[in-house]
Amino acid sequence: MAEIKKTPKSNTIIQVAEATGLSPATISRVLNNHPYVKEATKKKVLEMIEKLGYQRNNIASGLRSNKTRTIGLIVPRISMFFHAEVITTIQNILYKHGYNLTICQSGDSVDMEKDLIRALQSVRVDAVIAACTLHTTDFSPFDQLMASGTPLVFYDRVPVGKTSAMVIKGDDIQGGYLATSHLIEIGCRRIAHISGPLDCNLYQDRLKGFYNAMKIADLQVRKEWLFYHELTKENARIALKQIFEGPEIPDGLVADNDTTAIAALKFAKEMGLKVPQDLKIVGYSNDPRSEIITPSITTIEQYPDKMGEKIVEVLMARLQHKNMNPMEISTPTIMPVQLIRRLST
Amino acid sequence: MAEIKKTPKSNTIIQVAEATGLSPATISRVLNNHPYVKEATKKKVLEMIEKLGYQRNNIASGLRSNKTRTIGLIVPRISMFFHAEVITTIQNILYKHGYNLTICQSGDSVDMEKDLIRALQSVRVDAVIAACTLHTTDFSPFDQLMASGTPLVFYDRVPVGKTSAMVIKGDDIQGGYLATSHLIEIGCRRIAHISGPLDCNLYQDRLKGFYNAMKIADLQVRKEWLFYHELTKENARIALKQIFEGPEIPDGLVADNDTTAIAALKFAKEMGLKVPQDLKIVGYSNDPRSEIITPSITTIEQYPDKMGEKIVEVLMARLQHKNMNPMEISTPTIMPVQLIRRLST
DNA sequence: TGTTTTTATGTAATCGTTTTCATTATTAAT
DNA sequence: ATTAATAATGAAAACGATTACATAAAAACA
């Protein structure tokens, strides 16, 4: 005689229909505020919905309407300050538009990224927003996603070639240029540069900016002071060791992220070098750590919130005007950056 | 005569059925590796799936089976280091179990939190993992979620009273105790404490630990050196100003998070106080910033990855053994913490 | 007032799976 | 060899919404 625990059945549109004496269709119309519903019945239905505590089943809705009102986002890591900020902004704005966001981390693994694309496709998200891994060179999984009709917007780390996806990126050429020319302006002549892997557009562009600034100042770029590994603490130390074992040492360092800049600061301290007197350092991204460290680090601000806003803006436009040709190559949107001068320079 | 762009129709189980000459039921069985499928047909089906590039429609699947293989997570902010780490661990492990994770941020807003619960309920997640806002005292939205049959696990910021949800939290009493007794051991006698709002279990517990340590050392707790506001930089400054305007000044400070500890460090510098000589500071959470600041800050490590592992472990157990009475009050799991001594003490 | 148009509602098909039930093929048991 | 049990498949009914189509009511027009 044991009581059988049934999973509590949540009520459906049909319960609401019966309770109001209307048809399910009308309930659905109210839910989607279809124009052809009398104000009075609309009110009646809404009241009953409230009373019954009815909650629309988005799964059923999604199956029929082919709209899940969910956007998928793929990002290397949410723990990166820049991405955390972008995501938060995106999520807040999307929320106002009635969209949910499913956040996924690729952990900078190409395979994981591929899996995540499939997973998002499988849950039929209405669109995907992605910042690629450092090593994504094969974009065919993304292409396939688009081919299946899912709008796609890349940001920050974007494909290098042409793509029919929407693209929003920071002005990394300008960023690299600002960082480098700043060092030159304040007197540096022997500038090292720790860049990231050149598979990634970010580092290609920042490097371009670096070269531009060096060229304008008529300074020679020393290949032995150029590094292209993933920008971790550990790799930074390896690079720095190599630099400082050489016959000459630099008086300025352009680091392509703040983690590297911080590692460089620590390394300089250990070497007995004074920053900024003996070595001037500039980082990238304006990570909160760059501000609190001693000396605080000059860096490039990327305005993640502005980027988040732009991403949603572009995406919503695309989602609302289905008419625009999805295969059209649109020009990337480039967001401004700014140098934040601090005590490391 | 304009070519009409149809949304590319992704193929279904039926296409696969037709292509193999089998019934949809069998395809479904293969997909869910049901035992009663001949090895040969299984192989045939899988090959055809590969060939057609078929992808299961999880929406349809979810509707019928009432299982979405998606877990919802609600967290105050992903930008908090501790949470970012926990989330990443959870996501990675869940992924291995074949689950997706939908991450939502409440931004520490009770209303937003309520909305998010509804939203997750509406997309029929299989379970919810939540770290509450600082001000969540009404847990009825969560109760309702559970009543609808959704397993719920709280972590870190958990309900203070009894709950039928699963609960996993750090040993905050011990954490508060460790921080305080450490200061006492190294000679502090006049200890201030910047706590968070006591609505939140975390700060209640850490405060308890603080009191315990003070009592054991027979030290008097000065109410005028106790603060209970949200632990922001700004609030920290206000509290510190108040403390240092008083007739006496402390020689030790227990801060309930690292943001506050960092603000205190800065404040002390501005006041011309040497840390640790004049003032010893201990923080909480082992935020990366606490390590790189000068002097580095002693703090409490919470092992976010271990907590993430535990959360998934408990959740999976619950998800697999549906039989256990969901209304049973289970005892909270308490995860160990450790003091990391650095240069601020 | 009668006809047309517009508004408001209902009926039933549909979305793509899963799953119960029925049926057939295969193996084991007598 | 016959029966009983088990394995493998298919047919068709769900799941809970949306929506094309049909119809009824109301408003606009003649």
Image (spheres, coloured by chain):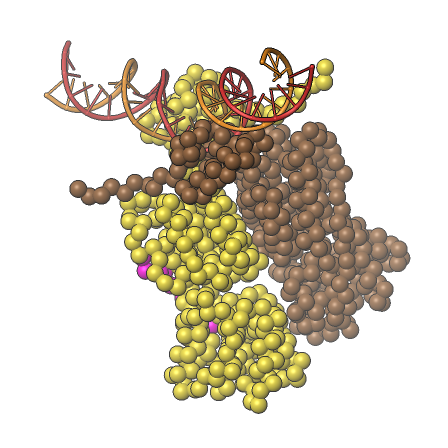
Chain colours: A brown, B yellow, C orange, D red
Camera-side residue: A320 or B30?
A320
* Residue B19 % position (x, y): 48, 17
User: Residue drawn at (89%, 55%), measured in percent from left and top?
Assistant: A216
- On the picture, is B218 further left or further right than A92? left
Camera-side residue: A60 or B98?
A60
* Residue D22 % position (x, y): 51, 15
- Quick check: can you spot residue A338? yes
Residue D9, above or below B181: above
Determine the image quadrant of residue B208: bottom left
The magenta span reads: B330-340
Camera-side residue: B232 or A242?
B232
Residue C22, above or below A328: above
* Residue B318 % position (x, y): 34, 48
Based on the picture, tell me whether residue A343 belongs to the magenta stretch.
Answer: no
Determine the image quadrant of residue A188: bottom right
Residue D29, above or below A123: above
